Amino acid sequence: MSLSSATMLGNYILIHKIKMKLFHILLILFVALQPVLGQTEKNEPSAYLFPEFSNGKILLKAGTSSVRMLNFNLLTEEMIFEYQGKYLAVANVESIDTIYIQTRRFISVGKLFYEIPATLKDPLIIQHACRVIAPGTASGYGGTSEASSTREIGRLYGAGQSYEMKLPSDYKVIPTSQFFVLKDGLPVRVSNVKQVIKCFPAKEEAIRKFVKENNTDFNKQDSLVELIIFCNK
C-alpha cells in the first residue's frame, strides 16, 4: 500500500470514528430529552378523565350495545365519543345502562354518569367533575376580574373548545369530583363519617372505629372505596 493510500485510509477511519462519536452523543441527548418533552405534553390542561380516547362499550337498557372511542368530559360531565374527527356527546343518557371504558365502569342515574369502582350491594359511586379557571383580565390593583373569567369560560363553550382534548395553556383545571353511596337506586352523598353512618346506621360503632384506625380520607377515592367495602360486609 502506498503512503498516500495509507493516509487516505487513516483519514477515512478517523472521520468514521468522529461520525460514530457524534451519533452516540446525539443519541444520548435524544434519550435524555424524552422525559422533558413528554412532561410538557402531560402538563397541558385537559378537561377529560382519561389522557386519550379509547375503545369503550355502551350497553343500553334495551339489551343492545355498541363500541365507540370514548372519554369522559369533566367540565360538561358528559360521555364523549369520537366520530370522524369530531367530538360528540352521548345522547339519551336515560336509555343507557352501563358504559365500560378500559377496566372502568360507569352507570347512568337520571341524566348523569357515575363511576362504580367496586361491585357491591350499596356501592360507592363517583360523580366526576371539574372547574376550569380561565385567565382573568386586570381589574385594578393587580387583581383579576371573576366576571371576566366567567365570560371566558362562556366563550370556551361557545367555540366548542370544551370538547377538545387540549385547553388553552393558560387555563387551569381543578377537580371537583363528589362521592356518593347508591341506596335504592338513588345517590346519597358521603363527604364525612356522619353521612356514611346515615347510609349504614346499623354499623355506626364499627364505622367510627374503622375510620379512626385507617385514617380514612373522604377526599380520596381509594380510601373511601375501602370504607364502603367494609360497610357492605
Image: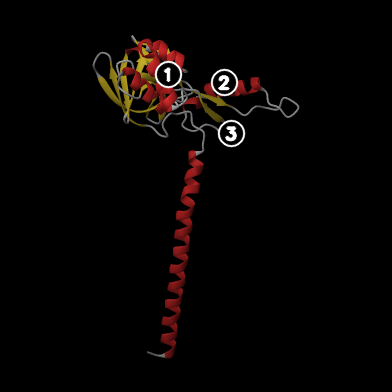
Measured in 3D between alpha carbons, the distance from the residue under mark 3 to the one under mark 2, in whole angstroms, is 16 Å
Q: Nearer the viewer, residue 96 or 5?
A: 96
Mark 3 residue type: Asp
Mark 2 residue type: Gly
Residue sticking out furthest to the bottom: 2
| Residue 19 percent across, percent down from the top left | 45, 69
Residue 113 visible here = no
Residue drawn at x 43%, y 22% is: 211
| Residue 113 percent across, percent down from the top left | 39, 18
Measured in 3D between alpha carbons, the distance from the residue under mark 2 to the one under mark 1, in whole angstroms, is 44 Å
For the C terminus, give its image quadrant.
top left
Q: Which residue is mark 3?
A: 170
Residue drawn at x 54%, y 26% is: 132
Q: Which residue is mark 1?
A: 208
Q: Secondary structure at mark 1?
A: helix
Q: Which residue is mark 2?
A: 154
Q: Nearer the viewer, residue 179 or 106?
A: 179
N-term-proximal mark, 3 vs 1: 3
